[in-house]
Image (tube, grey):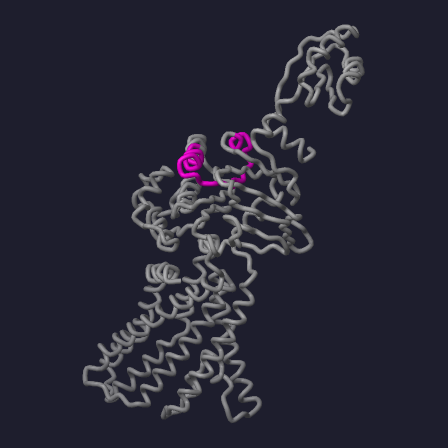
Amino acid sequence: MSRLLKVYLRNIFKQKGYYVCTGISLLIGVIIPFIISLFIKSTDTITLASRIVDSFKVDIIIVIFVTLFVCSDFTDGTAKNFIARGYSRRQILYGKYLASLIAVGVYFLGCLAFTLAFFAKDGLNFTISDLYMILAAIATAVASTGLYVIVANTAEKVSTGIAVNIIMFSFFSLLLEGLTTLLKLNINLSNYWITGLTGLMGEKAVLVDLFKVIGIAAVYLVLLFEISNFIIKKKEVK
Amino acid sequence: MADMLVARDIVKIYGKRTVLKKVNMNIQKGDIYGFIGKNGAGKTTFMRVILSLTYPQSGDVKLFGDKTLQEVGLKVGSLIEAPGIYKNLTGEENLRRFSILYGADPDKAPELLKLVGLNNTGKKKVKDYSLGMRQRLGIAIALIGDPELLLLDEPINGLDPEGIKEIRDLILKLNEEKGITFLISSHLLDELGKVVTKYGIINDGEMLEEIDAEELREKCKQKLTIEVDDLAKAMSIAAKIVKEENLSGNKHIMTVEGEVSKAAELNTALVKGGVAVKAIYPNSDTLEEYFMKRIGE
């Protein structure tokens, strides 16, 4: 498994798409807001920074580089080289997931470092609530990355993977929000969808909410991997 | 000799079509097994089953005695259909990356490139390689980690005559020097005939025959061709000496299958019976002719 992870990490970190996506993300999330902030003087830079860090959860960026990485095995036809040497479909899926998680983590850290470098010159006023919020975002990212990897691995094609991961799941989120309004529910259903779990954290994040997010994310992950293992178990590898 | 690959009753069904019908295969250590059949006969599907790229509806594959692919995967190299390669990397980078995956020494990559004649490709990306170069790289990837069993599906596809000879020599060299066992499928029967020690003939998903190359050569030899002036008369005379089912004729040529030793007796009888014998000689089927006969075409 370590050899598999090593190869996948090389694949993802030597992929141009990863750096293009990160670059775009930094441009939209840090550089442009920084330029704007030079003209519009804000006293609450940390609030602005945290809003920007939040904007890095731009799922689209993650979806694109994760899908490009996961599907490259199928588009290059290299997946069969793994299977034919005795690696199981399950090991391959977990390998891709772990490599994607590491890449997403590096992406987050990179974005965070840039944000702090640009916006936190006057020091940080970090509360426990902020920490809970970040941990909830990490739990959501861990679960949603699992979803993106599984969808891309099942779709095998970049276009299908991106289409399903972005369009279908965005539509699903909207649908849940629509249902909430239509049924006049007290809870927002879209906050329970895998990509929107941070919505469960209130204005002032508390520990109970964080546990709730982590618990739901874990249930999603287990369910997704069980379903995926069932689907890929007998799947043909081209 | 030790069993390297034993497949029993492999059945593979796609939709309503049965692609493999209880196929059996036995490959012993040191064999160069030629797997021959028409397009769509089931060769590639069978090799894919062995490599777990597809699962059979029933049947069993054992490698190196009684092990599964998952247990011995690193000892099995393969090239199935188009080679699986990272197109944005160079040949050497590809070999290094797969060496890590297979637990082999990445520094042996240049040696492997040299072995398949790609040592002068430098920084050229694989996406700029020709079909033949990609095929060679695919073979090099299959050779990573010194596998004991190599499965090659149409390995000489896209190669020029020189390349075909090089790959043929490489197969013989690896078989003789390193004792690597091969399972090779190919349409180029004459090329296959130059290296193979055992054949498996598959047609329409059924394994028709597994036969040693030596035995096949013997079978192909046993044919007598007699050129006569009166074919009908010659056939009736010959039918008294050899089995009728072994006789066939076309225009002035009478063919006797499998009874070469009766050449003199036949000649005498034909001459006595008033048939002019213009020529009489033993000859052999080519592998292609034998194969065509075997599949009934």
Q: Is residue B220 above or below residue B91?
A: above
Q: Is residue B140 left or right of residue B182?
A: left
Magenta-colored stretch includes residue B265 = no
Q: Is residue B296 above or below residue B146?
A: above
Q: Can you name the residue that lies furthest to the left here?
A: A122
Q: Can residue A57 be seen by looking at this rendering?
A: yes
- Residue A230 locus on image (x, y percent): 55, 67
- Residue B219 locus on image (x, y percent): 63, 27
Q: Residue at x 31, y 39 (%)?
A: B120
Instruction: Give the prevailing secondary structure in the magenta stretch.
Output: helix
Q: Residue at x 37, y 92 (%)?
A: A206
Magenta-colored stretch includes residue B191 = yes
Quarter of the rendering containing residue A128: bottom left
Q: Is residue B167 left or right of residue B153?
A: left
Q: Residue at x 45, y 84 (%)?
A: A215
Range of magenta residues: B169-193
Q: Is residue A91 above or below residue B81?
A: below
Q: Can residue A77 be seen by looking at this rendering?
A: no
The front one of A138 and B63 is B63
The front one of A170 and A138 is A138
Q: Is residue A179 left or right of residue A217?
A: right
Q: Residue at x 35, y 76 (%)?
A: A56
Q: Is residue A227 left or right of residue A108?
A: right
- Residue B263 locus on image (x, y percent): 68, 13
- Residue A20 locus on image (x, y percent): 33, 64
Q: Quadrant of the N terminus of chain A?
A: bottom left
Figure disc tally: 0
The front one of B157 and B257 is B257
Q: Can you name the residue that lies furthest to the front here?
A: B1
